[in-house]
Amino acid sequence: MFIDRASIFVKAGDGGDGSNSFCKIKGLKRRQDGGDGGKGGDIVLIADKNVQTLLDFHFRRHFRADKGLNGSGNNRKGAAAADCIIRLPLGTIVKDKYEDIAYCDLKESGQSVILIKGGLGGQGNSKFKQATHGDPGEEKEITLELKLIADVGIIGYPNAGKSSLISAISKARSKVANYPFTTKTPILGVVRLSGERSFVICDIPGLIEGAHAGKGLGDDFLRHVERTRVLIHMIDMAAVDCRDPADDFKSINNELKLYNPELVKKPQVIAVNKMDIPEAMENLKKFKKKVKKTVYPISCVTGDGIKELLEAVYKRL
Ligand SMILES: Nc1nc2c(ncn2[C@@H]2O[C@H](COP(=O)(O)OP(=O)(O)OP(=O)(O)O)[C@@H](O)[C@H]2O)c(=O)[nH]1
Ligand SMILES: [Mg+2]
């Protein structure tokens, strides 16, 4: 399990000050008419399925909500300030930076939590002898933690050879068979390259058209795609199941997009598999005409091309 972490400082808005105001109408006694201050903005956390990583929080570390407006004469209350909304990826756990306290675990898209409240506005002198200042907004230093299931996810149609690849490059043993949906749950493996280099890879169950709407093994596994950094898009170039490889490539990308438009923005390394089968070469020529992208031809049976593929993946990481 890999963890993306960031620490940020948050401060809720101060309350606006109460007003000290006096109204003088000719012939009448002087009257106090200062209004109350408005409430400061809260710090609100929202789980947003379009946010993928905590990267932004390594660049921006301070978040402050505005102060409520001050009260004014004629008993006018100051307006409350807007909340400061922080959008976080699904699965983020929010903890105190110094103490062992977890404030929330953002699991569902749209889930929102008021982390800290803005200060209440001060009282105007219409009620009190003297107007009071607004309460200060709370502040906190918090740590955000996002668990990634893996650095790299292998995606593709059933039977493309995803399990064959993970079994060839790591100690993970994912069942290989010539029927679709052999793999029913994600399988993790560790890939070790020369030197001290390594990464965690995940064999993701096969995707098909309509997966975003629950078809096949469904959208459950697209959620795992969200929690990886780089994708290996695996294509059966021998077209054993008689589909056009270029169509496979497009429809899987379309599923990613329909599920969450951010997913297609993840770096993809295209692995064209089963190059040991004679038809694959011919198919690859046609594929390259339709999909103008760099591809890595491999064979999980002979091992050809796998080293180059892994180096390319490591580079993207
Ligand atoms: N000739 C050849 N066959 C391969 C290659 N890679 C995988 N296969 C075969 O293709 C079939 C499917 O391979 P899997 O690795 O189970 O495919 P998968 O993508 O994990 O399939 P699902 O788990 O069903 O999504 C098996 O019969 C493999 O032996 C290859 O490079 N060359
Ligand atoms: Mg499999």
Image (tube, rainbow, N blue to C red):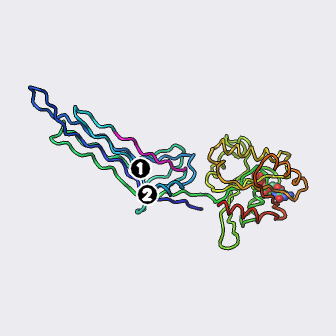
Cβ atoms under marks 1 and 2 closer than 8 Å:
yes
Please identify the quarter of the rendering in which residue 30 is found.
top left
Start-end of magenta stretch: 80-89
Q: Is residue 265 left or right of residue 6?
A: right
- Magenta segment includes 87: yes
Above or below, 169 relative to 259: below
Residue at x-position 66% and y-position 45%: 219
In the rendered image, the quadrant that contains the C terminus is bottom right
Q: Determine whether the residue tagged by mark 2 lies in a helix, strand or loop.
A: strand
Q: Nearer the N terminus, badge 1 or badge 2?
A: 1
Q: Determine whether the residue tagged by mark 1 lies in a helix, strand or loop.
A: strand
- Identity of the amino acid at label 2? Ile
Task: List x then y, in percent, for residue 22.
Answer: 16, 35
Q: Is residue 194 left or right of residue 84?
A: right
Q: Nearer the viewer, residue 1 or 137?
A: 137
> Does any portion of residue 182 appear in the rendered image?
no
Label drawn at residue 115 = 1
Q: Residues within 10 Å of mark 1 (few under 14, many from 20)?
A: some
- Magenta segment includes 4: no
Task: List x then y, in percent, for residue 162.
Answer: 75, 56
Judged from the image, the quadrant occupied by ligand 1 is bottom right
Q: Nearer the viewer, residue 27 or 199?
A: 27
Residue at x-position 17% and y-position 40%: 128
Task: List x then y, in percent, for residue 4.
Answer: 55, 59
Label drawn at residue 142 = 2
In the rendered image, the quadrant that contains the N terminus is bottom right
Residue at x-position 63% and y-position 44%: 261
Please identify the quarter of the rendering in which residue 290 is found.
top right
Label drawn at residue 179 = none
